[in-house]
Image (spheres, rainbow, N blue to C red):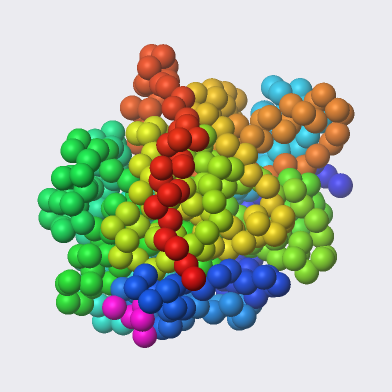
Amino acid sequence: MSKIPYKIYLNESEMPTAWYNLRADMKNKPAPLLNPGTHQPMAAEDLAPVFCEELIRQELDNDTPFFEIPQEIRDFYKMYRPSPLVRAYCLEEKLGTPAKIYYKFEGNNTSGSHKLNSAIAQAYYAKKQGLKGVTTETGAGQWGTALSMACSYFDLDCKVYMVKVSYEQKPFRREVMRTYGASVTPSPSDTTNVGRQMLERFPGTGGSLGCAISEAVEVAVTSEGYRYVLGSVLNQVLLHQSVIGLETKTALDKYGIKPDMIIGCAGGGSNLGGLIAPFMGEKLRGEADYDIVAVEPASCPSFTRGKYAYDFCDTGMVCPLAKMYTLGSGFIPAPNHAGGLRYHGMSSILSQLYDDGYMRAVSVPQTEVFEAAEKFARIEGILPAPESSHAIKVAIDEALKCKETGEEKTIVFGLTGTGYFDMVAYEKFHDGKMTDYIPTDEDLAKSLATLPVID
């Protein structure tokens, strides 16, 4: 066989025409969302005041294996998809490893990340429903940027609540959102009841994704013609993001490559869930086996130190209850630079798969993540986002293990986006001002003590 290209590109005819619903192959389905008041499973009519109608259908469907991607969305995807699968030859050589390393690069669009895959879908369904606009939260800003782009494309209003610490650390990300027409408010804010309560309880707080979600939901349900959309965690989002994994598998199959290990960063689960979807499907059906690894920040370790339980998806406790690995909805992580990985819980799909033993998880401190990011940038020529760099860190570690053992493993990881709006973080790393705050057992016990009691 000829040498594998540095970049494996698919043509337009090889792009996915349907999203893959991983739940269809799960023997143990994710636990249902519960009404926060009655603790009963939520039906479509219960979710209708918050979410778009078609997205609710996708959210609740555990059995349909494939959802056709509407032509309008496929046409939009063609502006930046298929995205390249890159063989990291230079990294392999520098590490001196027998491992073969590939990464799926999702940063080749203006939003700078994979988030646009779901943003355009959610904006499309909002427009199709005849809505005026949508509300959302954003952590590091990738989701808010992607949604502002998608809403601009469909002439929808977009209201973004951005976690305050990221709002202050990443002014340029904020300005990209405003360029695309979105209004951006630092969270917690004094514009909502939830925000005012949080400011009163925690003066000077840098905020959390859970709080920003609460504010965005409050605005959606009190504004006529608006619905709330979310960039991670939900089943519908992992469905849309399956384009990442479907393209990855098609590219690998094209050259007869079977990965041994698939690695992705994990905050709420959108990137990881999308990347692993078709591979996990094969694993669930008994057709193949893979070592699937979720990498999370040590400062917000939902998988590795959280509890698998029903919890609120937001700090204000107004959203549905989801069964997930969680640190407690009141958990406020340290203001580190893994902005998009600071959510207190994990996707119900991934939580169920992790609990069933189909994947494993590791947590890594942020200075080691930035060491890996810098190494990758110098060798492979791409400045990675801090979130993506969690996967890079573990991919390098695993490749070095192969160097020690002589194993020729094939490693695939997700490079979710670029870090050009994260230069404050890189500056602190280079100036030696970056710290590795890790919550104590007492910190986690305090937040986990607030978990709701479900009969």
Q: Residue furthest top?
A: 431
- The residue furthest left is 190
Which of 169 and 268 lies nearest the eye of the viewer? 268
Which SS does the magenta portion mostly show? helix
Residue 386 is left or right of residue 319, and the answer is right
Q: Is residue 48 magenta?
A: yes
Q: Which residues are magenta?
A: 45-49
Q: Is residue 330 visible?
A: yes
Answer with left or right where residue 67 lies relative to residue 338.
right
Quadrant of the image occupied by residue 45: bottom left
Is residue 132 or residue 135 the one in the foreground?
Answer: 135
Asked if 374 appears above or below 294 in the picture, the reply is: above
Residue 113 is left or right of residue 364, and the answer is: left
- Foreground of the two, 444 or 383: 444
Q: Position of residue 433 (x, y in %)?
A: 38, 17
Instruction: Count all numbered tags in the image, as a single digit.
Output: 0
| Image position of 92 with respect to 219: above or below | above
Image quadrant of residue 443? top left
Query: At 39% from the left edge and 39% from the top edge, which residue is drawn?
Result: 333
Asked if residue 148 can be seen in this view, the reply is: no
Which of the pair 387/123 is nearer the observer? 387
Residue 183 image offset from top left, x and y in percent:
18, 55
* Residue 273 image-quadrant placement: bottom right
Question: Is residue 201 on the magenta stretch?
Answer: no
Compared to 145, does 369 lie above or below? Answer: above
- On the image, the x and y values in percent for residue 367 come to 49, 24
- At a point 69% along the width and 52% down the height, the residue shown is 359
**Residue depicted at x 68% and y 47%:** 360
The residue lying at 73 percent from left, 31 percent from top is: 399
Q: Indicate the position of residue 170 as horizontal and vertical percent values.
A: 29, 37
